[in-house]
Image (cartoon, coloured by chain):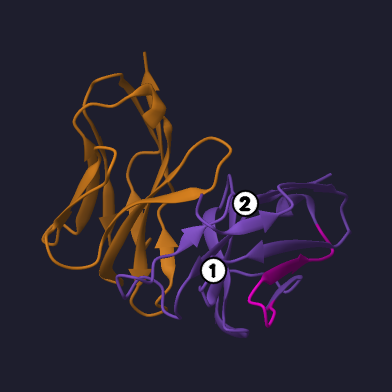
Chain colours: A orange, B purple
Amino acid sequence: AQSVTQLDSQVPVFEEAPVELRCNYSSSVSVYLFWYVQYPNQGLQLLLKYLSGSTLVESINGFEAELNKSQTSFHLRKPSVHISDTAEYFCAGILASARQLTFGSGTQLTVLP
Amino acid sequence: DSGVTQTPKHLITATGQRVTLRCSPRSGDLSVYWYQQSLDQGLQFLIQYYNGEERAKGNILERFSAQQFPDLHSELNLSSLELGDSALYFCASSPSEVAGVLAKNIQYFGAGTRLSVL
């Protein structure tokens, strides 16, 4: 079973609409979770991370993610998206056994005018 | 800018050839990680080096090898290239050995090298 699962490969949304990108993790993943963003023709950038403490984490550009341990989810949300948010978003977690970063398959967010 | 530098940005070569990808980690980071991103496999961890020594191996083919030098830069060598090796290869670095466990030990990624095997 995949350790980190992103349920949607493509999410189209209109500008200024809210968006949620879904991520679930398996029990083989220790609870250190990350969202990375990859803009077109660029490398991955860390968007936000959960290591400990408050289960709600925020990024500087309006995204937030909430850890839900009972549902083993770490969904990414933004209340109002911009055209510039168009990118691929990767959820990642640390495999407890290997202690390596393992990525989900990615979600392409396309913001439409 | 993540502080991780990868060269070259693009590489076009033929099947059967050998190429070397280079990565300079962020200043002060001792760990270097290599990843392959392809359309069919997604983002796959290949290998990690820490302070010059191999620390972890992922889905790395035997035709591929890597090393980390005393100045901490790393090279990924890909040989006997096949069409299926065409991909984006990313390097990441972090301060210490175990990724993500400590708040400060986050992986930061370079912009990648796009390899096209024709």
Residue type indicated by callout 2: Gly
Relative to residue B14, is residue B41 drawn left or right?
Answer: left
Write down the chain letter for disc 2: B
Comparing labels 1 and 2, the label whose residue is closer to the camera: 1
Of residues A102 and A65, the one nearer the viewer is A65
Relative to residue B74, is residue B98 drawn left or right?
Answer: left
Q: Secondary structure at mark 1?
A: loop
Q: Residues within 10 Å of mark 2 (few under 14, many from 20)?
A: many
Of residues B13 and B84, the one nearer the viewer is B13
Residue A14 vertical placement versus A51 (above, below): above
At x 28%, y 67%, the residue is: A32
Q: Quadrant of the C terminus of chain A?
A: top left
Q: Quadrant of the N terminus of chain A?
A: bottom left
Residue B27, label in figure: 1
Q: Which residues are magenta?
A: B68-81
Residue B72 forms part of the magenta stretch:
yes
Question: Are the residues flagged by discs 1 and 2 from a single subunit?
Answer: yes
Whether residue B94 is visible here, answered yes or no, is yes
Position of residue A108 measured from the top left corner of the image (x, y, whole percent): 42, 35
Q: Secondary structure at mark 2?
A: loop
Residue type indicated by callout 1: Ser
At x 31%, y 75%, the residue is: B102
Of residues A32 and B16, the one nearer the viewer is A32
Q: Residue furthest bottom?
A: B53
Whether residue B58 is visible here, answered yes or no, is no
Of residues A22 and B19, the one nearer the viewer is B19
At x 50%, y 54%, the residue is: B2
Residue A6 forms part of the magenta stretch:
no
Determine which residue is flagged by label 2: B112
Position of residue B100 measured from the top left corner of the image (x, y, whole percent): 36, 70
**Sequence-earlier tag: 1 or 2:** 1
Q: Quadrant of residue B25?
A: bottom right
